[in-house]
Image (cartoon, rainbow, N blue to C red):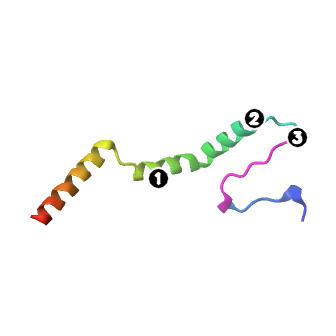
Amino acid sequence: MSNRNFRPPAEYGVVIRGRNNESPDRLVARFKRLMKKSGAQSEIRERYIQRFISPSEKKRAKKKRAIRRISKNS
């Protein structure tokens, strides 16, 4: 099997190899472009937003837990 024709499986996501005399900056730029084109970047962002809890929601939940704790002890 020739190393030149090797294609990684799709489950690896975006795989990038440096070309001859390619600067690291160009490599990173190419990686970012491929990530954006594949849609992986937006998927990661969506998953993060689903788990994100705003400070006001944290405060509300903390207050709710405190009220339950107080009413439970009384």
Which quadrant holds residue 24? top right
Distance between mark 3 and mark 1 Cα atoms: 36 Å
The disc label shown at residue 27, or none: none
Please tell me which residue is depicted at 42% across the width and 48% down the height of the picture. 49
Q: Are marks 3 and 1 in contact (CB under 8 Å)?
A: no
Image check: 7 left or right of 70? right
Please tell me which residue is depicted at 88% across the width and 40% down the height of the picture. 20
Please tell me which residue is depicted at 88% across the width and 58% down the height of the picture. 3
Mark 3, Cα crowd under 10 Å, few <14 / some 14-19 / many 20+, is: few
Residue 9: x %, y % from top left: 71, 62
Quarter holding the N terminus is: bottom right
The answer to which of 51 and 73 lies nearer the viewer is: 73
Please tell me which residue is depicted at 28% across the width and 43% down the height of the picture. 56
Q: Secondary structure at mark 2?
A: helix
Numbered disc total: 3
Q: Amino acid at mark 1?
A: Arg
Q: Mark 1 = which residue?
A: 47
Magenta stretch bounds? 11-19
Q: Are marks 1 and 2 in contact (CB under 8 Å)?
A: no
Image check: 72 left or right of 9? left
Instruction: Find out whether residue 46 is within the magenta segment.
Output: no
Looking at marks 3 and 2 on the same chain, the residue that comes earlier in the sequence is marked by 3
Q: Mark 3 = which residue?
A: 20
Instruction: Find out whether residue 13 is within the magenta segment.
Output: yes
Q: Secondary structure at mark 3?
A: loop
Distance between mark 3 and mark 2 Cα atoms: 12 Å
Residue lying farthest to the left in this orientation: 74
The disc label shown at residue 26, or none: 2
Residue 58: x %, y % from top left: 30, 48
